[in-house]
Amino acid sequence: MTETQKPMRSGFVALIGAPNAGKSTLMNQLVGSKISIVTHKVQTTRAVMRGIAIQDNCQIIFVDTPGIFAPRRRLDEAMVTTAWGSARDADISVFLIDAERGLTDDLETIIGKLETVNGPMVLLINKIDQIQRDKLLELTTKLHELYQFDETFMVSALNGDGCKDFMDYLSSNLPEGPYMYPEDQISDLPLRMLAAEVTREKIYLRLHQELPYASHVETEQWEDKKDGSVRIQQVIYVERQSQKKIIIGKNGQTIKAISTAARKDLTELVEQPVHLFLFVKVRENWGDDPDRYREMGLEFPIG
């Protein structure tokens, strides 16, 4: 049977795992474009990010979920609940492991809850280029002793090694059916939200240890200009005046650097010249505001 004779398939593939396992890097690699923000910090993915790829005659909708960890705040709880919910709703779930970090107590806790997820559960061991082969095989054996995975793949999300075999598996095992999105679409997120994520990534990368995790970016205005450019106005919300000062920086240098870096990526994203205007506002306890959760696509935890 030729490729054109293969039945059309489409479905959702949830990427779950501990923070910083490489889920966002993997999805960006598989989609072939930057959809999810990637930083060296944990818990950078908050909302559910979906990236869309086509392999053979199959449309694969990857769901990049927040990292699973022990929640301490209401926002943490919403992120973890969303991750598990996305896995339970998916056609195939993929449990991503950082090979370099190995099997930790946190991972064993997550593995203990995998049985609550319906459907196939695939083990994907990432960063295989960072570990010796004998240690990699030892890790794989331990993981299979803890849970009976349907399939196992070893990849490097950063350089793409092993990703083709993984994509071939998905394209052959997702349900038969028509595509759910246009063939040229790479995400189901509105451009406004993607633009806000771009700016949030630059905040994380710029501020390092000074970063206030209690920050949130919203795209308030989006105007297509007659000259072919786009004017984007965003607000960075923080909880305290001291956090606002950190983001603005001395003589406005920090926010200027954030704006410059974000504008560069946004220009590539929308393929138009971008005029970006950033404002910083204090909104106390925004982490307890249901409207902010809806903006991120998260369910507001009650209680």
Image: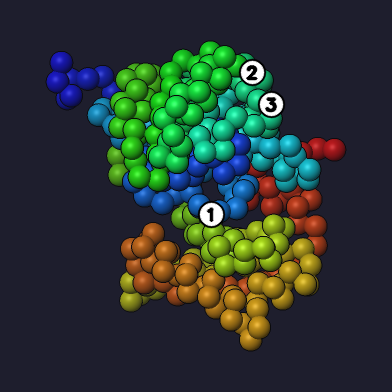
Q: Residue lying at the far bottom in this picture: please name it.
A: 251
Q: Earlier in the sequence, mark 2 or mark 1?
A: 1
Element type at marker 3? helix
Q: Is residue 114 left or right of residue 195?
A: right
Between 161 and 277, which is closer to the camera in this rendering?
A: 161
Neighbourhood count class around disc 3 (C-alpha, 10 Å): few under 14, some 14–19, many 20 upward: few
Cα gap from disc 1 to disc 3, whole angstroms: 25 Å
Cα gap from disc 3 to disc 2, whole angstroms: 13 Å
Question: Residue 114 has which mark?
Answer: none
Neighbourhood count class around disc 2 (C-alpha, 10 Å): few under 14, some 14–19, many 20 upward: few
Check whether the beta carbons of the residues at disc 2 and disc 1 lie within 8 A of each other.
Answer: no
Is residue 95 visible in this depiction of the protein?
yes
Give the residue displayed 33% in from the left and 76% down from the top: 227
Is residue 231 visible in this depiction of the protein?
no
Quadrant (top left, top right, bottom left, bottom right) of the C terminus: top right
Colour mode of the rendering = rainbow
Q: Amino acid at mark 1?
A: Thr
Instruction: Estimate the x, y position of residue 229 in percent, counting from the top left.
Output: 37, 72
Question: Residue 39 has which mark?
Answer: 1
Element type at marker 2? helix
Q: Is residue 74 above or below residue 225?
A: above
Q: Is residue 49 above or below residue 34?
A: above
Point out the frontmost of discs 3 and 2. 3
Give the residue displayed 43% in from the left and 64% down from the top: 266
Neighbourhood count class around disc 1 (C-alpha, 10 Å): few under 14, some 14–19, many 20 upward: some
Give the residue displayed 56% in from the left and 27% down from the top: 87
Q: Is residue 102 left or right of residue 230?
A: right
Quadrant (top left, top right, bottom left, bottom right) of the N terminus: top left
Identify residue for label 2: 116
Give the residue displayed 73% in from the left and 37% down from the top: 70
Q: Amino acid at mark 3?
A: Thr
Identify residue for label 3: 109
